[in-house]
Image (cartoon, grey):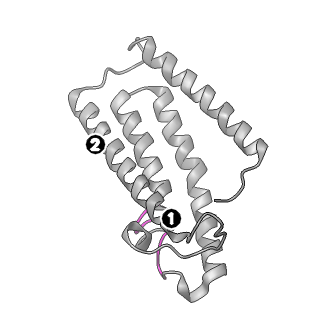
Amino acid sequence: MSPTTGPVVATAVCFNLVNGALVGAELAHGHSAHLVRPGLRALVGGMALFCAGAGVNITADRTLRRLRRGPEDRGHYVPRGGLFECVTCPHYLGEVMEWTGFAVATQTRAGWAFAFWTFANLLPRAVAYRAWYRSKFGDKCPQGIRAMIPFVW
């Protein structure tokens, strides 16, 4: 795992504190006039999307962890198998699926905002990772894969 700088950790903590406060406040105050009470379909569909995204995320993270040959291994490798055959960053796709599922299930503005900002943050990073993999590994990198959304982007 790469070392993480203090400012990155600090901004992540701040972001999550603000997001948690906004989502928590909106959920705690119930569904007032500006909110739509989620129906059974939205709740079940959102939960299913969240769980599917968590599965994608966990599977991709496990694949990435298994690339390392030990705690001291700092090498870089091309992940293969599963959604890594379609996209460079399936773990990012899983994260977006999770938060979109949360937004669908809760029908809150804060939930939709978090899903949007998760997508807006992770898609450019996935595009950058795809370019990095191509420049570092050349022909070893699977050809024709997308950055984060299979068959699309």
Q: How many tags in the picture? A: 2
Nearer to us in this view, 65 or 84? 65
Three-letter code, disc 2: Ala
Question: Disc 1 marks which residue?
Answer: 64
Residue at 35% from the left image edge and 21% from the top image edge: 36
- Secondary structure mainly formed by the magenta segment: loop
Q: Which residue is mark 2?
A: 48
Instruction: Say whether marks 1 and 2 touch (CB < 8 Å).
Output: no
Q: Please identify the residue farthest to the bottom as the structure is shown.
A: 139
Q: Residues within 10 Å of mark 2 (few under 14, many from 20)?
A: some
> How far apart are the alpha carbons under marks 1 and 2?
24 Å
From the viewer's perspective, is 76 left or right of 81? right
Q: Residue at the location (57% across, 41% down)?
A: 117
Amino acid identity at mark 1 = Leu
| Residue at x 53%, y 81% (from the top left corner) | 141
Q: Which residues are magenta?
A: 143-152
Label 1: state its secondary structure: helix
Q: Nearer the viewer, residue 34 or 118?
A: 118
Residue found 51% across the figure and 16% down from its top:
25
Above/below status of 144 relative to 62:
below
Based on the picture, tell me whether residue 109 belongs to the magenta stretch.
Answer: no
Can residue 153 be seen here? The reply is no
Residue 148 point in image, percent of width and height = 49, 62
Quadrant assignment, res 10: top right
Q: Is residue 96 above or below residue 113?
A: below
The image quadrant where one finds the N terminus is bottom right
Look at the numbered disc 2 and give the secondary structure of its residue. helix
